[in-house]
Image: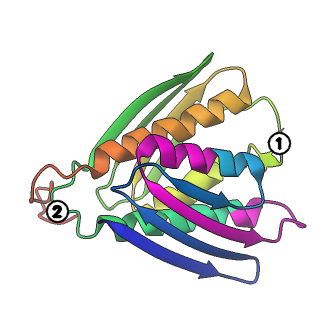
Amino acid sequence: MRTAKISRKTSETDIQMKLTLDGIGSSDISTGIGFFDHMLTSFARHGNFDLTIAARGDLIVDEHHLIEDTGIVLGQAITKAIGDKSGIARFGEARIPMDEALADVVLDLGGRSYMVMNAEFGSPRVGEFNTQMVRHFFESLAENAKMNLHATVRGENDHHMIEALFKAFAYALRRAVVVEGDRIKSTKGVL
């Protein structure tokens, strides 16, 4: 089982996370931000990842620290669960619609972090979730997973756009972590 347990405690947040890559899509998510819980649950379900998150943060300030740190911890958990990357497909892509919204995600687990996101949201919030945090969450995740991540989403309804993006990310990651053999997919011999 490719599993990782990560804890992160700062003066702003306290996050306990367990990720199993070869799961069934079960989740137990509690961040205190309903829409964010919904997105992380969707990520677990559509990626067939088992994910447990118990996160507390200084939500009295705003949700920035909690969402950022959750991205950091999820990125670290992905890296730890993958291990030495022997035999993984490495690359993954997905194109997911949700009503009028369409999300495209392409990623590489090659060991270099970089993110490009094309997304414009019409509202400042979906529930208690600041739409500016979508980009920041995925930046924090990509940096800590040492992942090259390209994501584009377009649509009219911010809820649909963000959910399509999380689902596309889940499917792309699922494809990238599939074990296809025993060799590292790199001419360098390391990832």
Indicate left or right for 111 with 27 as reference.
left
Task: Give the mark nearest the N terminus, 1 or 2.
Answer: 2
Q: Residue at x 11, y 64 (%)?
A: 189
Q: Residue at x 73, y 24 (%)?
A: 157
Which residues are drawn in magenta?
A: 39-66
Label 1 sits on a secondary structure element that is loop
Q: How many marks?
A: 2
Between the C-alphas of marks 1 and 2, the distance is 41 Å
Left/right of residue 151 with respect to residue 54 in the rendered view: left
Q: Which amino acid type corresponds to the residue marked 2 in the rendered image?
A: Ser
Q: Quadrant of residue 107?
A: top left
Front-most of residues 171 and 50: 50
Q: Nearer the viewer, residue 161 or 110?
A: 161
Q: Is residue 130 left or right of residue 37?
A: right
Quadrant of image for the N terminus: bottom left
Give the vertical position of 88 relative to 188 (above or below).
above
Q: Which of the labelled discs sits on residue 17, or is there none?
A: none
Query: From where the camera sits, is residue 184 visible?
Result: yes
- Say the numbered circle drawn on residue 86: 2
- Which sits in the foreground, 25 or 127? 25
| Callout 2: SS | loop
Residue at 41% x, 47% y: name it.
48
What amino acid type is highlighted by mark number 1?
Gly
Whole-percent x and y of residue 7? Answer: 56, 79
Neighbourhood count class around disc 1 (C-alpha, 10 Å): few under 14, some 14–19, many 20 upward: few
Whole-percent x and y of residue 9?
Answer: 65, 82
Query: Does the magenta run of residues contain 151?
Result: no
Task: Identify the residue under disc 1.
Answer: 127
The local crowd at label 2, few if under 14, some if 14 to 19, many if 20 or more residues have their Cα within 10 Å, is some
- Residue 154 lies, in percent from the top left, at 60, 24
